C-alpha cells in the first residue's frame, strides 16, 4: 500500500465541476488501496481577488492580516474537496496547515517551514480517510496563521511528502508536465520525461512558470522526487529528480523566454573602485533583484569613465529608477537610459558541463536569425542573452530548433 501525496493547483479546483473531477480521480487511486494525502490551492483567481479586496481598503494592509485573509482561500477548497469525496462515498477529512502540523517562522506572507509534525494526518490515514490539506499555509509556534509566498501550495505538498516519507509526490496542474519551451511561443516544444532539480530551477528562474522556485529548492535539498502532470488527462508527466549520468547526454534540456525584465544603462560612470559597489548596494538595500550585469571597457585617460548596464524585474522598474536617480550626485554618472523592450532568452542543460561549443552554437543561431545580442550571462548549466523584445519569439524558435529540433 503506497502513501501518495497529490497536489491540485487553482485551475484544477477552479469550479464545483472541477472539484468533482478531482474527487473522482482521488477516488480511483483510493480504490487501488493507496493511502492518500491531497493538497489543494485556492480556486483559481481567489487569492488575487482577496488581495484586491484588501487593497481596495488600503494600499498597504498589515501582513499578519493578509495571511489571515489569504488562508481562507485554501480553507474553502479543502472543505469543498472533502465534501465532494464524501458525496461519492469516500471517507475524507479536511485539515488546515496548522492542523496538519506545519510550523513556520513568523515572516508573514512569505513564511518558511521550520518543521512538520503530521500527527493528525497519520491518525486520519490510519482510520482509512483521504486527508485533504490546505496548501500555502502554516502557523508559527505561537499559533499565528502564516502563508508561504505565492504559489506556496507546491511547497506544502513537497514538504509533506518529505515529512511523511511518501512513496510518490504528484503535482497535478493544467499542463502535461515540463516542456522543452513554452508551447505558445515554440509550437514544436515537447514534454520532457525527466528533468533534474537544477535544470528546473534554472528554467523557472529564467521565466518558465512551472512551479514555485522555493518548492523545487526544498525538493532538491531533501531529495523529494516528484512528478508534474495534468489533472485533465491520464498522460504520464515529467519526473523531477537528482541529476543522473544519462541526463548529461542531452546538451540542452530547455529554452525559456522572460519578458519581465527591463534594462538600465548608466553612461559615463567614473571608473574607480567602489562605484559599482555603491550602485548595487543601493539596489540591494531596496530589495531590488538584479539579474544580468555588463560593464564596458572604459575610455578617457585622466578620469576614465565606463558604461554600466544591468537588468531588473519590470515590477521593480519605478523603484529602481528612483534609487538610481538618487545616486546621480554620488556615483557621478552622466545619463540613465531605461529600455523596457528587451527579452531574456535562456538555454538550460546539465549537458553543458560536458559538451563544448554550446555558447558558440547559440550565438551563431541568433546571428543567422538576425537577432542582435545585447548582454550575456552564464551559469554552469545556463546561458542567457538579452535581446530585442520584438524578435524574441523568432529567437526562441530558432534556438529551440537548433538544439532540440
Ligand atoms: N493560492 C496561493 C496563490 O495563489 C497558493 C497557490 O496557489 O499555490 O498563490
Ligand atoms: Mg496557484
Image (cartoon, rainbow, N blue to C red):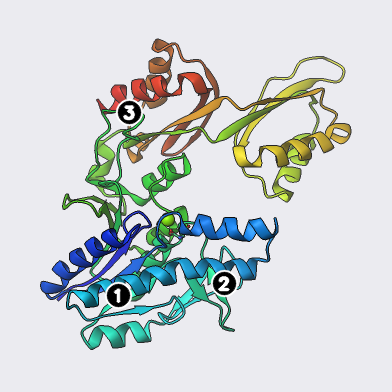
- 130 w.r.t. 185: above or below: below
Label count reads 3
* CA–CA distance in space, label 3 to label 1: 39 Å
Q: What is the number of the mark on residue 94?
A: none
Residue 375, visible in the rendered structure = yes
Question: Badge 1 local density, few (<14 within 10 Å), some, or many (20+)?
Answer: many
Q: What is the number of the mark on residue 68?
A: 2
Q: Residue furthest left?
A: 32
Residue 313, visible in the rendered structure = no
Look at the numbered disc 3 and give the secondary structure of its residue: loop
Mark closest to the chain's N terminus, 3 or 1: 1
Residue 75 percent location from the top left of the image: 43, 72
- 190 w.r.t. 217: above or below: above
Residue 227 percent location from the top left of the image: 26, 56
The residue indicated by pointer 3 is: 186
The N terminus is located in which quarter? bottom left
Question: Disc 3 beta carbon < 8 A from ligand 2?
Answer: no
Mark closest to the chain's N terminus, 2 or 3: 2
Is residue 149 toward the left or the right of residue 80 in the image? right
Q: What is the number of the mark on residue 82?
A: 1
Residue 157 percent location from the top left of the image: 36, 66
- 404 w.r.t. 379: above or below: above
Mark closest to the chain's N terminus, 1 or 2: 2
Amino acid at each position: 500500500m503506497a502513501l501518495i501525496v497529490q497536489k491540485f493547483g487553482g485551475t484544477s479546483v477552479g469550479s464545483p465541476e472541477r472539484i468533482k473531477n478531482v474527487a473522482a480521480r482521488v477516488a480511483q487511486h483510493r480504490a487501488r488501496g493507496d493511502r492518500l494525502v491531497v493538497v489543494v490551492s485556492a480556486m483559481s483567481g481567489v487569492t488575487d481577488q482577496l488581495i484586491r479586496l484588501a487593497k481596495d481598503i488600503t494600499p498597504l494592509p498589515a501582513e499578519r492580516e493578509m495571511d489571515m485573509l489569504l488562508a481562507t482561500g485554501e480553507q474553502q477548497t479543502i472543505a469543498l474537496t472533502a465534501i465532494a469525496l464524501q458525496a461519492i462515498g469516500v471517507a475524507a477529512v479536511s485539515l488546515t496547515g496548522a492542523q496538519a502540523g506545519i510550523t513556520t517562522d513568523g515572516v508573514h506572507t512569505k513564511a518558511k517551514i521550520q518543521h512538520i509534525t503530521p500527527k493528525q494526518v497519520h491518525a486520519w490515514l490510519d482510520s482509512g480517510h483521504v486527508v485533504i490539506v490546505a496548501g500555502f499555509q502554516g502557523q508559527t509556534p505561537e499559533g499565528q496563521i502564516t502563508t508561504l509566498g505565492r504559489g506556496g501550495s507546491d511547497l506544502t505538498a513537497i514538504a509533506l511528502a518529505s515529512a511523511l516519507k511518501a512513496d510518490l509526490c504528484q503535482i497535478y496542474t493544467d499542463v502535461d508536465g515540463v516542456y522543452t519551451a513554452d508551447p505558445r511561443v515554440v509550437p514544436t516544444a515537447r514534454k520532457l520525461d525527466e528533468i533534474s532539480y537544477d535544470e528546473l530551477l534554472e528554467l523557472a528562474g529564467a521565466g518558465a512558470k512551472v512551479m514555485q522556485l522555493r518548492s523545487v529548492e526544498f525538493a532538491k535539498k531533501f531529495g523529494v522526487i516528484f512528478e508534474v502532470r495534468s489533472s485533465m488527462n491520464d498522460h504520464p508527466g515529467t519526473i523531477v529528480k537528482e541529476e543522473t549520468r544519462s541526463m548529461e547526454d542531452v546538451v540542452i534540456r530547455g529554452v525559456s523566454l522572460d519578458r519581465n525584465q527591463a534594462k538600465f544603462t548608466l553612461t559615463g560612470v567614473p571608473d574607480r573602485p567602489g562605484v559599482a559597489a555603491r550602485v548595487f548596494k543601493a539596489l540591494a538595500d531596496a530589495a531590488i533583484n538584479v539579474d544580468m550585469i555588463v560593464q564596458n571597457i572604459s575610455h578617457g585617460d585622466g578620469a576614465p569613465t565606463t558604461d554600466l548596464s544591468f537588468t531588473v524585474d519590470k515590477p521593480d522598474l519605478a523603484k529602481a529608477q528612483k534609487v538610481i536617480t538618487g545616486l546621480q550626485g554620488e556615483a557621478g554618472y552622466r545619463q540613465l537610459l531605461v529600455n523596457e523592450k528587451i527579452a531574456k532568452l535562456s538555454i538550460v542543460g546539465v549537458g553543458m558541463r560536458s559538451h563544448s561549443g554550446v555558447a558558440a552554437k547559440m550565438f551563431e543561431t541568433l546571428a543567422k536569425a538576425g537577432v542582435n545580442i545585447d548582454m550575456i550571462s552564464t551559469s554552469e548549466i545556463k546561458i542567457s542573452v538579452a535581446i530585442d523584445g520584438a524578435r524574441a519569439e523568432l529567437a526562441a524558435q530558432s534556438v529551440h530548433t537548433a538544439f532540440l529540433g
